[in-house]
């Protein structure tokens, strides 16, 4: 505070905002999903997506692959929650801030849109589409779990 | 300070950081929060009591795997107060 008790010093407030950023970045580092778990989950996600688009539906192999990979993927999510719990952190499923919720909605719309577009392209004989879509969805999934493990998009105050 | 959104209870450095950690999480364990802040148990307890007295957070004690764990959560009122406070800081800083 400067001359007046009621007048906040801008430098102090800037330092306060910086401390908020630092706290959030430290939290991201602590809540980050381990590399081995990210790799396994991403591999399973790729299996689910490619299995859905490329496996033969008639023979039942598609149902088998998806039926095995999906519970395994969800199980890994459970393992991640347990790891965070042991670290003393409980992450929200739905982010609390509006920025976080928009971030989640944006990602969901992107993934769903890509999924539907791939179905359309595949129906038109574009066999490359599942591979490209799987790579894109998996890449954004990795970014999501490694950079935004709490679901909150963090933009440092000095970059706003 | 009587500015809308600016909250004297939250603005103290350690309490602002406590709210920043809690805002992104559902709950955080007492010892984890203490280690993040690098303060003693008593200092953290004092800050948590002030925030709890203001009605901003909940302290939950649970027995897990045979040991007592203390979890801290920012409630709806606290979350709103923190968001308003940060918004006000950004507005003042410009």
Image (cartoon, coloured by chain):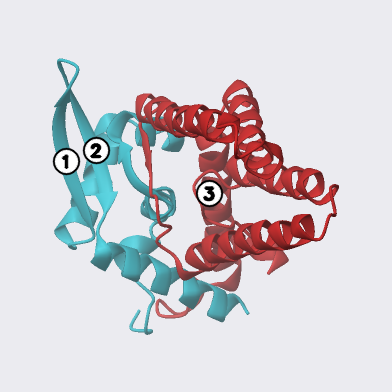
Chain colours: A red, B cyan
Q: Which of the numbered marks, if any, corresponds to residue B60? A: 1
Tag 1 near tag 2, CB within 8 Å: yes
Mark 3 touches mark 2? (CB < 8 Å): no
> At x 18% / y 54%, what residue is drawn?
B52
Q: Earlier in the sequence, mark 1 or mark 2?
A: 1
As measured in the structure, the alpha-carbon distance from the residue carrying label 3 to the one carrying label 1 is: 22 Å
**Which chain hosts label 2?**
B
For the point 57% across and 54% down, which residue is it? A21
Callout 3 environment at 10 Å: few (<14), some (14 to 19), or many (20+)? Answer: many
The residue wearing badge 3 is: A24
Secondary structure of residue under mark 1: strand
Q: Are marks 3 and 2 on the same chain?
A: no
Front one among A124 and B47 = A124
Image location of residue A97, percent across then percent down: 44, 65
Dot 2 alpha-carbon crowd within 10 angstroms: few under 14, some 14 to 19, many 20 or more: many
Task: Give me the chain letter of mark 1.
Answer: B
Disc 3: host chain: A
**Residue lying farthest top?**
B66
Label 1 in the same subunit as label 2: yes
From this view, report whether residue A90 is shown above or below residue A153: above
Where residue B88 sits in the image (x, y, percent)?
A: 47, 77
Q: Is residue A137 left or right of residue A14?
A: right
Q: Dot 1, how many residues are within 10 Å of its Cα: few (below 14), some (14-19), or many (20+)?
A: few
The residue tagged with tag 2: helix, strand or loop? strand
Residue receiving disc 2: B71
Identified at 85% across, 54% down, the residue is A126
SS of the residue at dot 3?
Answer: helix
User: Which residue corresponds to the image point at 14% horizontal and 35% vertical from the top-left?
Assistant: B61
Is B44 displayed left or right of B64 in the figure? right
Q: Is residue A160 left or right of residue A22?
A: right
């Amino acid at each position: 505070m400067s001359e007046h008790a009621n007048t906040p010093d801008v430098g102090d407030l800037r330092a306060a905002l910086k401390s908020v950023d630092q706290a959030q970045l430290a939290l991201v580092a602590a809540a980050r999903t381990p590399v081995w778990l990210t790799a396994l989950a991403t591999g399973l996600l790729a299996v689910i997506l490619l299995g859905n688009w490329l496996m033969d539906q008639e023979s039942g192999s598609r149902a088998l692959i998806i039926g095995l990979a999906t519970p395994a993927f969800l199980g890994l999510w459970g393992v991640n929650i347990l790891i965070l719990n042991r670290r003393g952190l409980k992450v929200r499923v739905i982010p609390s801030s509006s920025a976080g919720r928009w971030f989640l909605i944006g990602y969901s719309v992107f993934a769903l849109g890509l999924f539907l577009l791939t179905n359309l392209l595949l129906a038109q004989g574009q066999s490359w589409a599942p591979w490209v879509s799987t790579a894109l969805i998996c890449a954004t999934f990795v970014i999501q779990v490694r950079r935004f493990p709490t679901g909150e998009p963090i933009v440092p105050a000095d970059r706003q | 300070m009587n500015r809308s959104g600016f909250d004297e209870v939250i603005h103290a450095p350690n309490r602002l950081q406590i709210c920043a950690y809690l805002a992104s999480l559902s709950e955080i364990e007492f010892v984890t929060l203490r280690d993040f802040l690098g303060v003693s148990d008593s200092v953290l307890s004092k800050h948590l009591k002030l925030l709890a007295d203001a009605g901003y957070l909940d302290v939950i004690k649970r027995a897990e795997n045979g040991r007592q764990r203390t979890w801290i959560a920012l409630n709806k009122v606290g979350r709103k107060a923190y968001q308003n406070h940060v918004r006000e800081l950004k507005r003042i800083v410009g």
